[in-house]
Amino acid sequence: MTPDNTGKILIRAVNWIGDAVMTTPAIGVIREYFPQSKITLLANPMVSQLFYHHPWVDRVITFDRHGTHRGVIGRVKLAGELRKESFDTAIILPNSFDSAIVPFLAGIPVRVGKVSDGRGFTLTGRYHRKKNGAVCHEVEYYLELLRHFGISGSVTQPYLYTLPGEDHSTATLLAEQGIRQEDFLIGINPGATYGSAKRWYPERFAEVAGRLASEWSAKVLLLGGPGEAEITSDIEKKLQGTALNMAGKTSVRELMALIKRCQFFVTNDSGPMHIAAAFGIPLVAIFGSTDHATTSPYSDKGVVVCKPAECAPCKLRECPTDHRCMTAVTADDVVDAAKKLFAETVTWPT
């Protein structure tokens, strides 16, 4: 692969929003290394939205594994659609067999990715990650994957983009709810799609939100997906109507613009956490069952709060015992971390 012989590149995106944000530095490096190539991203409906209008991607193709591209027949159909595009190269970021077999069936001449999940035969360029290698952040893993294939560049930080019109619509929406442009806004994200083991407790989020809002004369914005509406509703009740609850009411693009508008963010390990990091929002992230060494917010304005537990990180969806990794984290822990970070990073309002 050289910039001279690679005209059309297909990047197979990862499948979760947070993971996709962590791949943006790698996508930026691909853009930098192949400045004249046409770069197309293949992604599911949720991840696709992250990259609409993104300056590092020329085009987004959305596949629907629950609809048009469901099952074996659907994957073959998707491969046929990609074959018509005549891509020169496929860079496959996920590690699954499914993500590699479609570019293989599409007949894309160069197909590179990590050897895993029995898919080595589908790849023309193979990355073998050392089993006992040093633990590194996911952002750094994707950059190392590219370096293995000779693709390098200067981009190192996650990056997302919203249109001015999207930002204006967000400002209008918030103004209609009594949140002015000059108001300091704290985003609270109490959900985590992967499972309840990653979730801190609604009553503690409510206490943190109330204390910080009082300390900073701030407004509170509650965010999350449709499955987290009940959690945010509990927090909203505890804050006695002083918070705007937008959980389950936004598209991914709208969620991005709302997070971008926040001056501070308090969150579980989640997709919105990584979105906030990509926009440079100061944030406190509460970790328990997951490994903050590999998936922490990749930002110098992000602080992780966690407590050691002999069973953590277990990376399970549901806690099989007493959730000690999360019960040990108190509201005081999070408030103290937030106030320290605020003093170091926040310069608005004066």
Image (cartoon, rainbow, N blue to C red):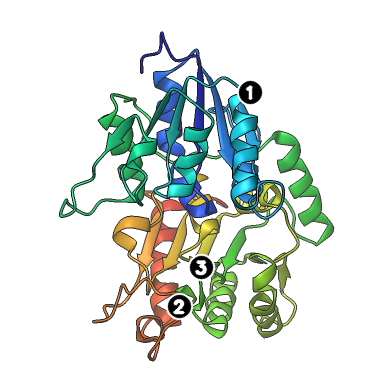
Q: CA distance from mark 3 to mark 1?
A: 35 Å
Residue 174 in sight: yes
The secondary element bearing badge 2 is classed as helix
| Residue at (46% x, 73% y) in the render | 198
Q: Residue under label 2, please give it.
A: 197
Residues under numbered marks 3 and 1 in contact, where contact means CB atoms less than 8 Å apart: no
Image location (x, y in percent) of residue 249: 76, 62
Q: Earlier in the sequence, mark 1 or mark 2?
A: 1
User: Quick check: 201 above or below 269?
Assistant: below
Q: Looking at the picture, how far across and down is residue 265, in whole percent?
A: 53, 61
Gap between marks 3 and 2 measured at Cα: 8 Å
- Find residue 310 and report its image quarter: bottom left
- Label number found at residue 84: 1
- Left or right: 181, with 31 as reference point: right
**Amino acid type, label 3:** Tyr
Callout 2 amino acid: Ala
Q: Is residue 164 left or right of residue 43?
A: right
- Name the kind of residue labelled 1 in the image: Lys
User: Where residue 233 appears, x then y in whole percent?
Assistant: 70, 79
Residue tagged 3: 194
Assess whether mark 2 and mark 3 are in contact (beta carbons under 8 angstroms): yes
Residue situated in front as seen by the camera: 193 or 259: 193
The quarter of the displayed image where residue 165 is located: top right
Residue pushed farthest front? 73
Q: Which marked residue is nearer to the observer: mark 1 or mark 2?
A: 1
On screen, residue 48 versus residue 100, left or right, reads: right
Of labels 3 and 1, earlier in sequence is: 1
How far across and how far down the image is residue 91, in percent? 43, 32
The disc label shown at residue 284, or none:
none
Tell which of 130 and 215 is nearer to you: 130
Quick one: 122 or 2, which is closer to the camera? 122
